[in-house]
Each structure stands twice: as structure tokens, then as C-alpha cells.
Image (cartoon, rainbow, N blue to C red):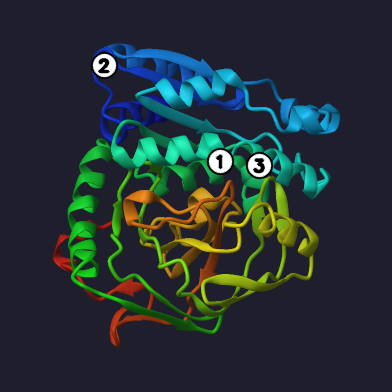
Amino acid sequence: MTDTDHKLAKLLVNYSTKVRSGELVGIRYEPLASELALAVYKEVIRAGGQPFFETAPEGAAEAFYELASDAQLKQINPLTLWSRQKADVLISLFAPANTRALSLVDPKRLATASAARRPLSDIFMKRSASGELRWVLTQIATQALAQDAGMSLDQCQEFVSQAGRLDVDDPAIYWQAFDRWQQTVVDSLNAKRDQVHIKGPNIDLTLSVKGREWINCSGSHNFPDGEVFTGPLETSANGWLKLKFPAFYNDNEVVDARLEFKDGRVVKATASRGEAFLNATLDTDPGARTLGELGIGTNEGIARPVGSILFDEKRVQTVHLAVGAGYPETGNTNQSSVHWDMIVDLDDGQITIDDEVVYKDGAFIIGNPKLKPSIN
């Protein structure tokens, strides 16, 4: 067990989720994250929580989609349902051994299973928005992530460490300072703003955020973190976006995706590779073609894409538009079993709200820049 595991475990338990005595804490993990899972388990016990584990052996998901009948695809695991209903805290530790494990599964089978699990996502969203459920997810460096990122494993571990500021003595101090700065940005965004226009070489999209709430993301749900997000008005998005880098969902890769929006819905979606999967996912349920989220990346420690949404959506000089389920705490009411973040490089683009430029050259020009902590 490494020093990084100890630091990360303490952050997830004491900073991100603030586990309290007597709380029921679910620890979801993939096999390659077993050492981190043990470190988290120990921290939960030290905090007075009651931990339980959710895990499965490598290959379980592939076996399920290969062997499951239609009836089994549509079933909800009762133990998973119980944990979503009863847990006070969920801590998820992703450690992919194979990021393409489901790439050959029929997209319709993936969509069928995803639609069947919608009650789970609805419960999760509602309990999270009300504060009944606190949660955080993270991803550790693995050979699969390193390969996708074009790095060695050592380089990937260093990248993950810097993205989360695990390379400093007390990362919580950095994230607390980051939270204070980013809250000044969110306070400005929430000051009675309405019409958003995102324009650049890869996007020309208008939408409304009138009456919606912007959220400060500084490590309480995702780790590493670094974004602000809201939920657009469901019928307001008009325009287009294209993805400079491949998009990934359910272990499937979509290349050169281009989406066109009219009155809030995706009316056309194309790609040079993965187009059938893209459209099958958008047809999963009625809400899958509607925007549930607009997010803006702010983590300067993530300077390049690595093929993982957790990291890529936090990258500076990007926005992400998620089709599918919206977060109730923003005011968005779109419901879907899908939540797919489409990450758009802004490059030379900018964001205006009510004709005021709020974001340009990869950074916000609102808020209090003096409070922003340095990554150096």
C-alpha cells in the first residue's frame, strides 16, 4: 500500500464525503483497486462508519452481456437497489484492466440493460440532490489507462497524482483553497444570468440557464475535480458541436462525433466510427437526446486528454455537454438512464452569458483570480 493510497483514502473519506460515526458506507471497487479499497475501508472505520463492499471479478460484465437472456438484461440486482436506497455514502474506485471490454457487445443489449437500470439512477440522483446520499468516485492509474493516454505506467501515475494534487503534503489544503476561488466564479454565474453562447472552432451552441443553479465542483463528488456545471433549460439548446478527440461510453469508442441540436434535442448525430453505437445510445429512452448538463473544466493540472471522462471533462480549455439525465440540484428535470459527457475543445473559443464574455483563452474572467491556488 503506497503513500498515495493513504493520502487518497483520507481525502475520499474525510474531505470528499465527510464520513460520520454510524453511517453506512458502500465501497465499490474494481479488482486492480483492491489496495486502495483496503485503505478506504480502514479510514471509514477510523471515522466511525460501517463499511461494506461492492465488487466483481474481472470479466463479469463481459460474461453478463454474452450470456444474459432478455429477461436478465431487464432485471435490477436487488442488492444494488438496496445499497442505493440505504447507503449514506458511496465511494467508487475505478481501475480498468481493459477499457474496451464491452466494445463488441450489441449496442441494443447495452441500451436495454441501461434502460432497465433507470430506477437506480433516479434514486441515486434524487438522494444525492436532497443530501441523503453523499458520494465520490475516483480512478487510479492502470496499464489500460496508461495505454489509452499514450503514457508509461509511471508517467500515468505521476499524471493522476498531479491532477489530484496528491504530490503535495496535504492535498486537502489545496482543494479547500480551490473551492474558495471557484465559489467566486459560481457566485457570479448565479447572478441572474440567462442566455449562454458557446462559440469556437468546434462548437456554436446557444442555450438558456435561466433559473438554474451553477454548482462548484472541488472534490466532493469526483476526484480529481475541477469544474463548474449547471443544467440547461431542456428545450433551449440550438446549434452544433463536434468532438476533436474520441468519445467513450460503455467501453465503446466514437470518433469524429458531430451533434446538431434543435429546441433542446439532438436531431442529428454522425461519426466516422461508432455512429451506430452513438445513435443507439441516444435512442435508449426519450430523455437521452436532451441535454442534462453543461460543464466547464477548470483543472490546470490536466493539460491533455487521456481517454477517461473523469479526467478529460475537468481539463482546462474544454466544455462538456452531457446528453441524458440532469442533476436535480441544478434545476434540470430531464430524466434518462443515459448520462454521456461530450467533451468539446474550446481552443480559441469563448463563452458569453447575456452578451458578456465570461470565459476566454481557456480561463474564466469572472470571480476573484487572486484566490486561485497555483498548481506549481
Disc 2 vs disc 1: which is toward the camera?
Answer: 2
Q: Please say whether residue 272 is visible from this viewpoint.
A: yes
Amino acid on which the number 2 mark rests in the picture:
Ala
Q: Nearer the viewer, residue 103 or 370?
A: 103
As helix, strand or loop, the secondary structure at mark 2 comes to loop
Lower sequence index among marks 2 and 1: 2
Amino acid on which the number 3 mark rests in the picture:
Ser
User: Picture quarter containing residue 59?
Assistant: top right
User: Picture quarter containing residue 96?
Assistant: top right
Question: Picture coordinates of residue 250 (x, y %)?
Answer: 68, 45
Residue designated by label 2? 47
Number of residues whose C-alpha sits closer than 10 Å to that of mark 1, classed few (under 14), some (14–19) or many (20 or more):
few
Q: Mark 2 to mark 1: distance in Å?
A: 32 Å
Whether label 1 touches label 3, CB < 8 Å: no
Q: Mark 1 to mark 3: distance in Å?
A: 35 Å
As helix, strand or loop, the secondary structure at mark 1 comes to helix
Residue 114 bears which disc, if any? 3
Question: Picture coordinates of residue 190 (x, y %)?
Answer: 22, 66
Residue designated by label 1? 154
Disc 3 vs disc 2: which is toward the camera?
Answer: 3
Whether label 3 touches label 2, CB < 8 Å: no
In this picture, residue 345 sits left or right of residue 174: right
How many discs mark residues in the rendered view? Answer: 3
Which residue does the image show at 51% across and 25% down from the upper left? Answer: 28
In this picture, residue 61 sits left or right of residue 85: right
